[in-house]
Image (tube, rainbow, N blue to C red):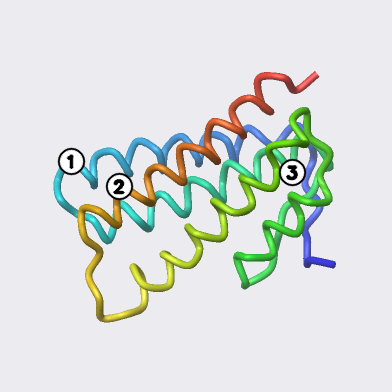
Amino acid sequence: MTRTKNVARDRYTVFWNRAMQYDESLKGAFENGAYDAAVSHAVHCAISAIDAVSVLRIGKRSSAQNHNEIAILLKETKTHDESEKGKIIESLSRLIEMKAIAEYEDKPMSKSDAEKAMNQCRKVFAFAEEEIDRKG
């Protein structure tokens, strides 16, 4: 069981707006060749997007220090597209692996790394957007 924090379900918009902000800053960082930042923003965009979904659906978000626990919470969250969750969890895991390198190690991220992060983020973001659009 993951550590969670209860959040009023109507507050999902805070996390969704945050995801959209990270998405915009991700694009700018990539265009400016700031690939470390682009990877970091991709990770945080995906995390915020999944926080929005879990808050909307079950009124909880992960409060764990380990970002991998967000995947556990997503598994517990009933979504409109249950068949896609496995792929989304895989994308989240790949992004979180990249986060450690981009933010804490002495290896700079390449354009290719940033493109991979953006592709994984797009999958998560699109899934979350569909869930937000179908909030009813």
Q: Position of residue 69 (x, y in %)?
A: 69, 64
Residue 81, relative to residue 54: is it above or below? above
Sequence-wise first label, 3 or 1 = 1
Relative to residue 11, is residue 6 drawn left or right? right
Residue sitting nearer the eye, 9 or 42: 42
Q: Nearer the viewer, residue 58 or 9?
A: 58
Location of residue 127 in the rendering, given as x and y in whole percent from the top left corner: 60, 33
Q: Quadrant of residue 36?
A: bottom left
Q: Position of residue 44 (x, y in %)?
A: 48, 53
**What residue would you read off at disc 2?**
115
Residue shown at 48% from the left, 46% from the top: 45
- Element carrying mark 1: helix
Circle 1 residue: 31
Compared to residue 22, the image places residue 104 above or below, namely: below
Question: Mark 1 packing: few (<14 Cα in 10 Å), some, or many (20+)?
Answer: few
Q: Residue at x 46, y 54 (%)?
A: 43
Q: Amino acid at mark 2?
A: Glu
Q: In the current view of this chain or complex, which residue is farthest to the bottom?
A: 106
Quadrant into which the C terminus falls:
top right
Q: Position of residue 50 (x, y in %)?
A: 63, 45
Q: CA distance from mark 2 to mark 3?
A: 26 Å
Nearest-to-viewer mark from 2 and 1: 2
Residue type pointed to by label 3: Ser
- For mark 3, what is the residue? 54
The quadrant of the picture occupied by the N terminus is bottom right
Q: Report, in whole angstroms, how far the alpha carbon at label 3 lies from the one at label 1.
A: 31 Å
Residue 91 in the figure: left or right of residue 122: right
Q: Secondary structure at mark 3?
A: helix
Quarter of image, res 118? top left
